[in-house]
Image (tube, rainbow, N blue to C red):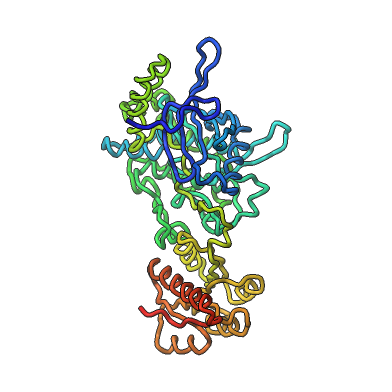
Amino acid sequence: MAEIPASHIGKYEVLTRLAVGGMAELFLAFVTGPGGFRKYVAVKRILPHLRANHEFLRMFLDEARVSEMMSHSNIAQVFDLGQDADSLHLVLEFIEGQDLAHVLRAAHEHQRHLPIGFSCAVVRDLCQALHYAHHFVSSSGTPQPVIHRDISPRNVMETYSGLTKVIDFGICKSRDSLEQTDVNRRKGSWGYMSPEQVRGTALDGRSDLFAAGVVLHELLTGQRLFTATEDATFIYKLLDAEITAPHLVSPEVPLEISKVVMKALSRERDARWADGKQMAEAIAAACGPTLFDSERRATLMRELFASQIKRTRHLLEVAAQEDTGRVVDAASELFAAHQSTPTVSYLAESRREEAVAAQTWAELHPCILAVDDSRVGRMLVESFLVPEGFRVVGAPSGAEALSILQELTPAMIVLDVRMPEMDGFELCKRIREQPHLAATPILFLSAACSVEERAQGLQVGADDFLRKPYENVELVARVKAHLMRQAVLKKSGSGPQRPGPVQK
């Protein structure tokens, strides 16, 4: 029997815990009123170990502030922000439904493809919600555009009655704050981010529309477009590789629908749909009479999730009868079902890069300077090191690297040997001429790694060499080894020293 962690959260009586992620937990609860009135809600509460984390508290309050202002049929509503003796909690609309990740999985388990009309209707509604957020105007009449930044199948819900709801605006950004985006604190779901979001540049609503295009491609084909892992394949495919149109993956997808998707997936923002309304209208026009209405979508959801619907409605029924024993039993059944196929999935926080620590980012994450004239090369270094807790600053040239080093003393420098204008050897020599960088470990990346190249590198002050292409574990191991040696030398009082090459 599942344990209900709390009988009340604020004024809300808890029935069961629906989900728990890395940063918050979600409960099904209700509040009562005169005449037997009862309203069911989802209550989101910060996990105990994060209640002193000011960064997450700020994000939690941002979600409440932004979501509470918005009112759209395709955006999950936030009713209230409360605080009790334990922590802050957010009161949200209770959505009887499933996120698209579970819809896709259920279709696979039933050995069927999602109907094209269903997929197009869902993403059309998603685009309408995004258009509203991107053009949001406050009650005072002030434009306050909101970019979601984490559109993925787990943040789009489909209700059992055939309605689409966008959830989790917890990492959204207003237009005014987008220019301060920090590439080393990039937020979002890998595999669904736009090229500009991966690069860490300023975003507008077209970034969300790129993600919507990725979601529609996945719904139409039943396959992931980009891998979710932070590896070379993902970076290469996203930034450079040709994207296969949906109709070439699944021949039953009409060409006109495929064209809509490919326009959304344009790497250049100006080539995408101008706004969510335009993309929604294009989807509807391309799909035509095959576009599902809410009744047909509800029919499909009932076919895919009959047992989950039965459990949820049984719990609500016995709760209304106020039979405590049966409520606990029904809650236990629903909680157990949620461990494999959760009915509601608000907790995207568990998949994000938000480190759970009270210390500052700079204290926790040593800074690595990656110097490479290749954009993909810099992104590979970043994608391999950031998940390991490092901050990565990129420089596209030797001159830019020297400029950065006037303001920044990195823990280590990862340096490509072959670059135009100023190659790695010349840059390394100039770096070693600066006293405060004399002991900073420098790792050369080279496709050749010849004996002559290594000798020249050692002569100008390089510490180590890594042959390209390399695996992520190789780069991470080299960086960690050099930093560990530096830490040991510092602790022993030996003073700053260059540690020398790491033995393979």
Quadrant assignment for the N terminus: top left
Q: Which residue corresponds to the image point at 49% horizontal and 46% vertical from the top-left?
A: 211
Quadrant assignment for the C terminus: bottom left
Q: Which residue corresponds to the image point at 60% horizontal and 74% vertical from the top-left?
A: 401
Where in the figure is residue 315, as x and y percent of width and height?
38, 22
Query: Which picture quadrant has residue 405?
Result: bottom right
Residue 73 against residue 283 in the figure, above or below:
above
Q: Which residue corresponds to the image point at 57% horizontal and 62% vertical from the top-left?
A: 363
173 and 420: which is toward the camera: 173
Where in the figure is residue 246, as x and y percent of width and height?
38, 46
For the question of whether residue 498 can be seen, the reply is yes
- Relative placement, left or right, of 220 versus 182 is left
Query: Which picture quadrant has residue 432?
Result: bottom right
Where in the figure is residue 104, as x and y percent of width and height?
35, 39
Of all residues, the one furthest to the top in this rendering is 35
Residue 137 against residue 453 in the figure, above or below:
above
Q: Which residue corresponds to the image point at 53% horizontal and 87% vertical from the top-left?
A: 460
